Image (cartoon, helix red, strand yellow):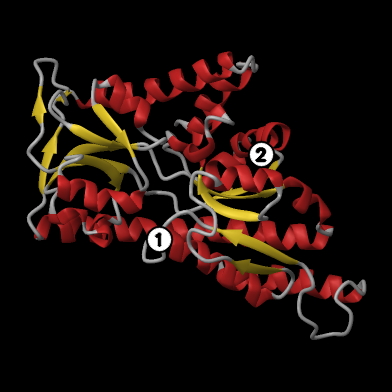
Amino acid sequence: MQQKLKHVLAAAGLAMLAGGAFGAPGAQAETTLSLVYPFPDFLVYTKSCKEFAEKVNAAGVVKIDVKPFNSIGMFEQAGEIRKGTVDMTCLPAAFYARGLPENEAISTSNSSPAEVRANGGMAIIDELHQKYMNMKYLGWVDTGVKFHVYFKDAPKFGDDGLPDLSDVKMRDNPIYGAFFRALNAETHQMPVTDVYSAIQKGVVNASAWTSIGVKGLKWDEFLRHRLDPDFYQTDIGIIMNLDTWNSLSETEQKALQAAVIEHEESSRKARMAEVVQEKADLEAAGMQVHVVPNADKYLEIALDSAYDRMTERLKSDDRPLDAVEKLRGLYIK
């Protein structure tokens, strides 16, 4: 796949050289795109985002200028992309689902990028980004990674077979906040960089996170119990300002889109391998695994709570509901 991408981008570069867009052969790309990212540099999702930028820069058709961490706060990045303050980001869809409620379809999906590209689901998401957010949705990367809830103390279960979260102080996040509230959890929203200290001080005693990264964040020093089954899926998208996208030449657009599609596939393969390894590492280090007795109902609440929130937000914004069931059918298999 890497070799295929090189051929695609090389062909795009030659076409632009033939057209005089880059001037003399061997000239560097003239178009520079700025990129920000939401998570600390040591996390795999940031490393993956930078890896994508490196691939694009190596091809030489366009250049990506990666800005330092926290150049723009994680929850402000979507708004700044929309305004054009910065060109691109690798951002979870849930972080701006208030502005584009249909993003819940990505967060709750159990499909792959290849599947939703083929069935038209991603085209609908892209169309919605362009219409309502002044953004181009280029693709969905680092997939194949689901979420678990991690606890300081062993979780309790009610007579209904669902987690009893009455004594749990849960770290919230836009991805799964509706799910936890549907389970009557006390939630506290905070950036990922604040969570270690919050657990240490007892502000929270539980948090959801992906199947990889808990060790890197060192949360496993305190959170020693994991709840199964896992739910949802990482929803990191590569998005860019629509005006910037439209300003690119056709060759630049094709080259950039080809790079995203290649990274969808390569990052998915890498992340899924890491899920297996981290699970083994956590369990070897003493992580206790607890299975929800009524697992089917648990996952049903996870999905329904997200789609209910999507519908409520669309109604509140006086937006059409026609995409809701359509996306559910395309992103859930």
Which of the two residues, 316 or 125, is positioned nearer the viewer here? 316
| Residue 117 in picture, x, y percent from top left | 60, 43
The residue positioned 29% from the left and 27% from the top of the image is 180
Looking at the image, can residue 248 be seen? Answer: yes
Tell me the kind of residue under disc 1.
Answer: Pro
Q: Nearer the viewer, residue 273 or 184?
A: 184
Give me the residue at 23% from left, 46% from top: 198
Bin the neighbour count of mark 2 within 10 Å (Cα to Cα): few under 14, some 14-19, many 20 and up: some
Going from the N terminus, do you reach mark 1 or mark 2 first? 1
* Residue 82 left/right relative to 271: right
Mark 2: amino acid: Asp
- In this picture, residue 3 sits left or right of residue 210: right
- Quadrant holding the C terminus: top left
Q: Residues within 10 Å of mark 1 (few under 14, many from 20)?
A: some
Q: In which quarter of the image is residue 157?
A: top left
Label 1 and label 2: CA atoms lie apart by: 27 Å
Whether tag 1 and tag 2 are in contact, CB under 8 A, the answer is no
- What residue sits right under mark 2 in the picture? 126
User: From this viewpoint, is residue 149 visible?
Assistant: no
Query: In the rendered image of this protein, does residue 50 appear above or below residue 152?
Result: below
Picture residue at 15% right of the left edge, 42% below the top: 202
Q: Position of residue 171 (x, y in %)?
A: 27, 38
Q: Name the residue under label 1.
A: 40
Q: Answer left or right for 177 relative to 94.
A: left
Q: Is mark 1 on a helix, strand or loop?
A: loop
Task: Look at the picture and state if 310 lies above or below 241.
Answer: above
Query: Which of the two marks, 1 or 2, is nearer to us in this view?
Result: 1
Nearer to the camera, 6 or 145:
145
Q: Where is residue 98 in the image (x, y as percent from the top left)?
A: 53, 29
Q: Position of residue 60 (x, y in %)?
A: 71, 75
